[in-house]
Amino acid sequence: MTDLTELTAVQLVDGYRKGSFSPVEATRAALERAERIQPELNAFVRLTAEEALDQARRAEERWRRGEPCGRLDGVPVTVKDILLTRGRPTLRGSRAVSPDGPWDEDAPSVARLREHGAVFVGKTTTPEFGWKGVTDSPLSGITRNPHDPGRTAGGSSGGAAAAVARGAGPLALGTDGGGSVRIPASFCGIFGLKPTYGRVPLYPASAFGTLAHVGPMTRDAADAALMLDVIGTPDARDWSALGPAPGSYTEALSGGVRGLRVAYSPSLGGQVAVRPVVAEAVRRAVERLAELGAYVTEADPDFADPVDAFHALWFSGAARVVQHLRAGQRELLDPGLRDIVGAGARYSALEYLAAVDVRMELGRRMGRFHEAYDLLVTPTLPITAFEAGAEVPKGSGHRRWTGWTPFTYPFNLTQQPAATVPVGADGDGLPIGLQLVAARHRDDLVLRAAHALYGAGAGTSAG
């Protein structure tokens, strides 16, 4: 008998159309899996079983009549507890946020999923206000890795990644301000896409400004393309959102990589110390791209680590997030968050604008780089998942999470589309991710290349 928790969204929709199984059956399977993994992984802030089954019954009736309401009718999905969901509190991992309503509005991405009939299984965990690259918070505790619960799931969309990896719904909405979709997707062995900034509208506006993206976290690139087709449409509440997409991302998947110019940067010009097992897995996947017809050249983008500029923007955003809190509420915050809030409050306007200048120059350099190359390939992370409950690996010497994520945050600064594809595992069975980056607005190229890697067997399935 088919295990419905192992199917992709594309496969579920095909099964509904053929009558092989129903949205109610798929939703029950996802809910049962979510309840089973929750004590071990802590991926959810709350499950919404009654609401989900009601949505699934209505979807089942629409499919019975041959009148699905959208492209994801009856597909189970989870939403990171950063994004507004009508009728449910969005606490953002914080004890300082009141659960009292009214919670009467959907975020744009949630609204598009609802319009297309998606079934909302629950809200997934996040560190407080999504501030770091691992998922633990004073509100919900530690979220753990599905491949080894002693390790971190990554963050800040760690609950979303763990849920998808263990079959608690094939689709998840995550957010990414410095790697928060790609980091946990890499650690948990799934696909994660940070689209071009503005491709997926965001409301309310993030205090982290135009660093913050919304993106799909899925079992493979085909599901992400389908999800982006749904959520990547304009919303009047986000004045910075892009116009309609130039075409269907799903239809673009078949383009393959033949003839694409691919730059392979193993370490950003020697700036990053990458674990040998990670470097080897990524190198093998790059060789597959060449076998599929891509023109691969080892080449590094010409930029120095922009971490200081990123910190100025990120820490200032964190200070803005909590600016309205009273002293007693601030005492409830994650101690690490309090640290960066203090640092962020000390930046002057001129220092902030100097960081913006660094960002603009980085964007110029990457724009010129992509005149020569269609895609940039790097490791997603230089390491695999480390111990749960820590912001940085023990003995690493890093103070903040940005110390071990040097491949991710630069492309939040530049607003480029970037995705992670699972390409292997280390000796402990912990997933390894490869990052694909394209020029702004070329999300289709990232998805095409990722889809080609899955077709070539480079993308290992979620566990």
Image: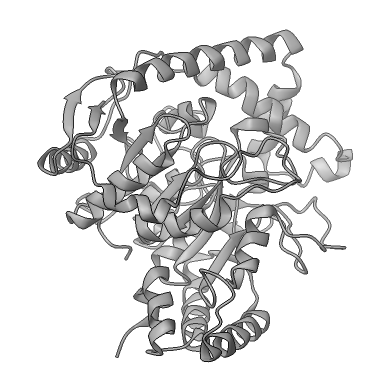
Q: Is residue 151 visible?
A: no
The residue at 22%/41% (across/down) is 257
In the rendered image, the vertical position of residue 168 relative to residue 376, given as above or below: below
Q: How many marks?
A: 0
**Which residue does the image show at 30% across and 32% down from the upper left?**
378
Work out whether residue 170 or residue 48 is closer to the camera in this orientation and state it: 170
Position above or below: 244 against 399: below
Q: In the orientation shown, which residue stands out farthest toward the left? A: 291
Measured as percent of width and height from the top left, residue 411 is found at 47, 29
- Left or right, 247 with respect to 92, comes to left
Question: Looking at the picture, does residue 357 appear above or below residue 441?
Answer: above
Give whichever of 241, 192 is nearer the camera: 241
Screen quadrant of the N terminus: bottom left
Percent from the top left, x then y, of residue 7? Answer: 36, 74
What residue lies at 76% left-to-right and 63% top-to-bottom? 89
In this picture, residue 340 sits left or right of residue 166? right
The answer to whether 16 appears left or right of 140 in the picture is: left
Q: Quadrant of the C terminus?
A: bottom left
Q: How is the image coloured?
A: one colour
Residue 215: % across, % down: 52, 49
Looking at the picture, how far across and down is residue 2, in whole percent? 31, 86
Image side of residue 88 versus residue 389, left or right? right
Query: Is residue 118 visible from the viewing direction of this image?
Result: yes
Residue located at (42% from left, 14% from top): 365
Q: Quadrant of residue 408?
A: top left
